[in-house]
Amino acid sequence: YSRPATEAMRWGNLLEPAVVERLRDDGHEIEYPLYLTLTDPERPWLNGHPDGFVTLDGQNALLEVKTVGGWAHRANGAGVPLHHVAQVQHYFHLTGTKRALFAALVNGQHLETHEVARDDRAIGLLLEAAERFHWHVVTDTQPPIGPTDSDREALALLYPDASEARRVRLDAE
């Protein structure tokens, strides 16, 4: 499945090489771009596409490059947004590396870099969640609804004609 590229995705793809060049200008040794799909040997459905590799203090490390808007940047506060940390941890699992350089071009004007360290506990939690999700996909089993009243209220607003235990198969639209 491949979703159509959004305007933000197009700009991200155009600007990513410029970010890499700026990092090289700052003295980083970088292997980029990687046209590489990494696959977990125990889970052939689990794969990833890291942006590149970089040398940090003489060690091979991951490179992840993002272009972000100011709103997303401010919403995160400081550091690397959690969903990007999860992506990097996923890549740590696939590569065996222990460090990453995360570079974010904010509003097309300001480059921020952060180092991310491998967290084996986080990787374990991500793998458990991925396996649960994969099980739901291959068994065609709907995951349970969240445990909060607000989850149930939101679903009731989205699907006012729904009734308990009634299944509806949606078409492409």
Image: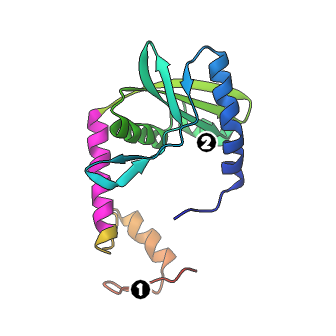
Q: Are marks 2 and 1 in contact (CB under 8 Å)?
A: no
The image quadrant of residue 142 is bottom left
Give the residue pinned by disc 2.
Answer: 72
Whether residue 27 is visible here, answered yes or no, is: yes
Foreground of the two, 117 or 42: 42
Q: Is residue 125 above or below residue 2?
A: above
Separation of residues labelled 2 and 1 (CA atoms):
35 Å
Q: Label 1's element?
A: loop
Q: Is residue 53 magenta?
A: no
The magenta stretch spans which residues? Answer: 120-136
The image quadrant of residue 87 is top left
Whether residue 143 is visible here, answered yes or no, is: no
Q: Residue at x 58, y 80 (%)?
A: 173
Give x and y (percent) for residue 107: 71, 36
Q: Residue at x 67, y 34 (%)?
A: 17
The image quadrant of residue 32 is top right
Which mark, by number, is residue 39?
A: none
Give x and y (percent) for residue 103: 57, 29
Q: Residue at x 57, y 17 (%)?
A: 28
Earlier residue among tags 2 and 1: 2
Answer left or right for 78 relative to 41.
right
Q: Is residue 132 magenta?
A: yes
Amino acid type, callout 2: Ala
Q: Main secondary structure of the magenta part?
A: helix
Q: Is residue 8 above or below residue 81?
A: below
Give the residue pinned by disc 1.
Answer: 168
Give x and y (percent) for residue 129: 30, 53
Mark 1 neighbour density, 10 Å: few (under 14) some (14–19) many (20 or more) = few
Residue projecting furthest to the front? 35
Foreground of the two, 108 or 28: 28
Residue projecting furthest to the right? 109
